[in-house]
Image (cartoon, rainbow, N blue to C red):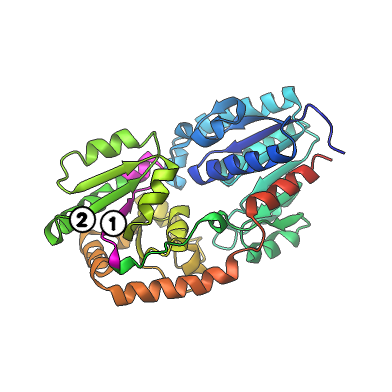
Amino acid sequence: MIKNNLKIFISATEQSGDNIGYNLIKEILKSNDQIIFEGVGGEKMSNYLNTQFFSLKDFNTMGIFEVLFSIKRFIKMIKYLANIIKNNNYDLVITIDSPDFNYPLAKEIKKNKYNNNIIHIVAPTVWAWREYRAKNFAKIYNELLVLFEFEIKYFVKYGLKTNLIGHPIYYIQKNKNYFEKNKNIAFLPGSRLSELDKLFTYFQNAYEYLLKLNPNTIIFIPTLEHLKPKIIKLTKNWKLKIIISTNSLEIEKNYSNCSKALVCSGTASLEIAKRNIPQLIIYKLNYFTELIAKNFIKVKYANILNILENNLIIPEITNSNLNKISFEKGFKKLINDNKSNEEQINKINKILKNIETKNPPFYSAAMRILANLN
C-alpha cells in the first residue's frame, strides 16, 4: 500500500535523461497523481517539478578534460542538493544517467544518512570502460534500471538488484517513406553548446556541398530552446531552405520527410536508426580527453549498435579521425550511395529486433518506482 503525500527527488542533467524523466513522471502520475516531484531537469521535466534546483544549462560539459574545469562547481552543487534531500527526507531518490554527477550525488546522500531507496536509471557504460563502477554502484544504489539486457550481468554479480526496462526508442515510429524518394536532410549537431562549437564546421561543410549539389535541398535541424538562438545565428547566411524546430510534433513531421541525417554521436543516432533514416555519425572529444580515454576504452566504436555487433554498421568518424578530408568523403557517400544506405538500414533493423523489449520502457520503469514506494 502506497502512503499519501509522497515526495520524490529526481536528477537528470542531460537531454536524454530529461526525456526519460519527463516520460517517467507522466507514467507514474497515471497511477498516483498526488506524488510530488522535485529535483534537477531540463525543459520537459520542469513542467512536472514542484521545485527545480538546476537546469541542463548548468551541465554543459563533456569529457574528462572539460569536467576538470567544473569540479569545484559540481562539488558545491552536489553538497547543496544532498542537504536539500536530507532536510526534505524524500520518500525516494531517482537519478538518471550522467553517472559522473549522479553517482557522487548518491554517495553524498548516503553519507548524509539518507535511509530511503535510491534508484538509478541507465547503466553506466562499464562494458566500455571503468568496469569498477559496477561494484561502486552496488554499494550505493538499491536498484538499477537498464536499457539493454546484456548490461544486467555486469551489476548482478555484485548483488545490485538490476531490472531491464528497455530503450525509449520503443516509442519511435519507423519512417514509412522510402528514403530514396525524400530530399530533406536532417542535421543533428548535439544537445550541448560544447558539441555545437566543436562540430559546426562540419555541418557548414555539409551545407556547402549540398548547396552545390542541389539548391532545392531542405535542411531540417531539430534542436533545443537553449541552442536555437546560436543555430539561427550560425545558419543566417545559408541560402538553402532551413527548418529549425524545437516542437516535438513538428520534429516528428519533418523527420518523415528526411532522406538522410548527419548526426552528433549519442542517443540521437540510435533514434535516427529506429526511424529508418541512413546516417553518418560524427563526434570530437577534446584532444587531451581523447589521449586519456584511449588507454581505458575497451570498444572500437561510438554508436551502441556498432558496439553490439563489433562492426561498423553505421558509418562514424570520430575524434582525431575526423577532419575535413575524412568528413567530405563520408558525407558524399551518405548523400550519393543509396545501395550502401539501404544495407545500413537492413542491418540496423535486424539488430533492433534483438534489443527492443515487448513492454513499454516507461511503464516498466514506473512499475519499479512504485514498487519501491510500498
Q: Position of residue 252 (x, y in %)?
A: 42, 50
Where on the picture, by quarter, is residue 371?
top right
Instruction: Give, as a three-letter code, the residue at label 2.
Output: Thr
Q: Distance between the residues labelled 2 and 1?
A: 7 Å
Which residue is nearer to you in this view: 157 or 353?
353
Describe residue 48's horizontal placement relative to residue 276 as left or right.
right
Instruction: From the viewer's perspective, tell me whether residue 111 is left or right of residue 234.
Output: right
Write the residue at 44% across / 53% down.
Answer: 268
Q: Looking at the rendering, which quadrant does residue 227 occupy?
A: top left
- Is 342 situated above or below 119? below
Q: What element carries label 2?
A: loop
User: Which residue is tagged 1?
Assistant: 185
Q: Out of 5 and 117, give the one closest to the viewer.
A: 5
The residue lying at 59 percent from left, 43 percent from top is 23
Which one is earlier in the sequence, the residue at label 2 or at label 1?
1
Q: Which amino acid does label 1 sit on?
A: Ile
Residues marked 2 and 1 touching at CB (< 8 Å) = yes
In the foreground, 107 or 177: 177
Mark 2 crowdedness (10 Å alpha carbons): few <14, some 14-19, many ≥20: some
Q: Give the magenta-colored segment's residue range.
A: 181-196
Extreme left residue here?
A: 212
Near-viewer residue (102 or 290): 102
Q: Give residue 230's quadrant in the image.
A: top left
Give yes or no for residue 187 being in the magenta stretch.
yes
In the picture, the disc for residue 30 is none
